[in-house]
């Protein structure tokens, strides 16, 4: 798959190398040509000098064929603008934007752009948003039998009550993060696009739970 990354700082360059090592094609955009030195001599992807929210620059980077777009430059406004152009103009489904001001997270997420405040931002978290890899454990008990894991949920579940969703998967919701804030859902809490769902289950069932939640819900629900 093809990925476009805006910003060749520490996170952007690490993300680009990681994706290329996984066999994907990558284009990196930065207004400073010298920034591409962080990619190293072995990087074989595209290096595009320009402004990441400029349509011509994005086209040059292959946005028309992109599976995902990550805006990880040093500017909040540039990142969110570029992410919106990628999502709204070029219909890129998987888009993330880095922000430095946590207070803006709720505004951005209401626009449908997943964001993470920079203090919590790592290249691994970006990869998790761009390239869903199934359930990701965030805590395992000392015995190794019980786990809290972040599980991707199919958009087909939007509007369904979380209690019904986890019943189908045979698990429990540990907590939900919505618009940057975590909470314990009530029985009637519905799943919304952009929610990050953490489930509580046993390690031997984690893969099965992830498979159920990441798939289109049954037609009779």
Image: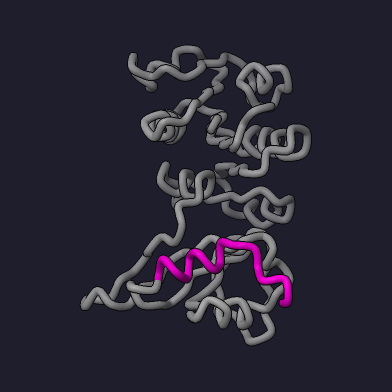
Along the line of sight, the residue nearer the viewer: 119 or 204:
204
Along the line of sight, the residue nearer the viewer: 95 or 181:
95
Give coordinates of residue 66: x percent, y percent: 62, 31
Above or below, 28 relative to 124: above
Residue occupying image coordinates x 67% and y 54%: 109
Above or below, 40 relative to 69: above
Along the line of sight, the residue nearer the viewer: 29 or 150:
150
Give coordinates of residue 221: x percent, y percent: 72, 77
State which quadrant residue 96 falls in.
top right
Above or below, 59 relative to 150: above
Along the line of sight, the residue nearer the viewer: 63 or 101:
63
| Residue range highlighted in magenta | 206-221
On whether residue 211 falls in the magenta region, the answer is yes
Most distant residue in the front direction: 219
Residue occupying image coordinates x 22% and y 76%: 142
Give coordinates of residue 192: x percent, y percent: 69, 66
On whether residue 96 falls in the magenta region, the answer is no
Most distant residue in the bottom direction: 187
Give coordinates of residue 183: x percent, y percent: 56, 75
Residue occupying image coordinates x 40% and y 69%: 206
């Amino acid at each position: 798959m093809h990925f476009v990354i805006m910003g060749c700082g520490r996170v952007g360059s690490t993300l680009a190398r990681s994706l290329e090592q996984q066999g994907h094609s990558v284009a990196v955009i930065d207004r400073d040509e010298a920034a591409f030195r962080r990619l190293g001599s072995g990087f074989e992807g595209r290096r595009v000098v320009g402004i990441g929210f400029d349509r011509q620059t994005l086209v040059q980077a292959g946005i028309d064929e992109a599976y995902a777009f990550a805006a990880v430059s040093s500017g909040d406004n540039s990142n969110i603008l570029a992410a919106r152009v990628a999502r709204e103009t070029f219909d890129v489904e998987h888009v993330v934007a880095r922000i430095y001001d946590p207070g803006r997270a709720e505004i951005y997420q209401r626009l449908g752009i997943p964001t993470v405040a920079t203090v919590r931002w790592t290249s691994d978290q970006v990869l998790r948003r761009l390239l869903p890899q199934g359930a990701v454990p965030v805590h395992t008990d000392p015995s190794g039998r019980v786990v809290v894991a972040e599980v991707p949920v199919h958009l087909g579940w939007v509007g369904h009550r979380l209690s019904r969703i986890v019943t189908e998967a045979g698990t429990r919701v540990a907590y939900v993060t919505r618009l940057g804030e975590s909470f314990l859902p009530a029985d009637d809490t519905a799943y919304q696009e952009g929610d990050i769902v953490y489930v509580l289950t046993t390690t031997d069932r984690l893969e099965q739970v992830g498979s159920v939640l990441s798939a289109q819900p049954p037609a009779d629900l």
